[in-house]
Image (cartoon, grey):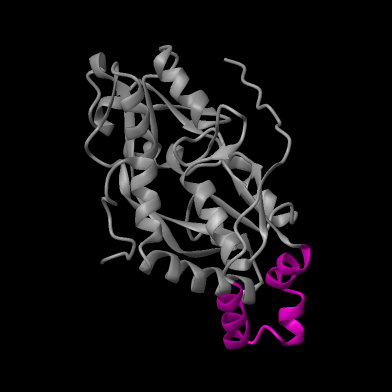
Amino acid sequence: MSLRHRTRPLMVICAGVTGAAFLTACSSASGTTGSGASSSTLQTVIKRGTLNVASCLTFPPFGSLSKDNKPQGFDVDVATAMAKALDVKVKIVDTTSANRIPNLQTKKVDAVVCNFTTTAERAKQVAFSDPYIVAGEVMLVKKASGISTLADLTGKKVAVTKGSTNGDAVKAGNPKATIQEYDTSAAAVLAVKQGQADAMVEDSNFLNYQAKLDSSLKVTKDSVVPLEYNGIGVQAGDPTWLQWVNTWLREFNTSGEAATLYKKWFGVERPYPLNPSY
């Protein structure tokens, strides 16, 4: 099936004007008055007055467009909260999984908040914050498919999104599965619904939401891979910006704001703790 990704115009959301006191304290503590800090994304964003954030707007409830064509979702709210703490506006730039890293490398955006799983391979190209959400990677299938484990994917077509780690995970678990890549998660879900793919592997938060929307679909219980920790992506080589993001993220998580937003969009409490355990 030939799929073309539509390019949407940039979309802007204005965040509230608060958090200046926190920013001042954080800047002082992290040494942002030095010459290195003056060239940091942190100072660029403050001077510009806008935080540019890439989010995937075909990935509800993480990101989507409302009826009046405005960005909405959990990741959009996270980005908006970041901007609020910086006392700037937020501009949401629609992106795909495959374009997350290029968006940072070309400085098209200041941060990526789009279900971005932290991996050692990706960390060679970009920097990651501490986790802000955790997920298992599971399968979305038709209830009548008989598929419940990786072993059941032998000879089956599995839909994944381009730029994700899911295709490699499936192949590692069952080399006899056929991987089909799609530009967006929405296109991969549609492939399962229309019978063009037998299963889709993706974030459990996203797939549970999709199964609620269509009674003919179900989500498998067992995770295809170990838990994945998703962080906010930023450009490599900017420790001042990364430190601010992590400092803000710690307050965002410990204050309960993150948990409130999670329940708002997913309808349940967080199923997994943010801190990895070994």
The magenta stretch spans residue 28: yes
Which image quarter is the C terminus in? bottom left
* Total marks in image: 0
216 to the left or right of 119: left
Which image quarter is the N terminus in? top right
Q: Is residue 175 visible?
A: no
Q: x and y percent of residue 115 in the render? A: 48, 47
Residue drawn at point x = 32 percent, y = 34 percent: 208
Residue drawn at point x = 74 percent, y = 52 percent: 108
**Of the pair 171 and 96, the residue shown nearer to us:** 96
Q: x and y percent of residue 3 in the render? A: 62, 20
Is the residue 65 above or below the residue 101 in the image? above
Residue drawn at point x = 74 percent, y = 62 percent: 49
**Which residues, given as a range, are shown in magenta?**
20-48
Q: x and y percent of residue 274 in the render? A: 34, 61
Is the residue 264 above or below the residue 237 in the image? above
Q: x and y percent of residue 152 in the render? A: 25, 26
63 to the left or right of 106: left
Q: Is residue 258 visible?
A: yes
Residue drawn at point x = 75 percent, y = 54 percent: 106
Q: Main secondary structure of the magenta part?
A: helix
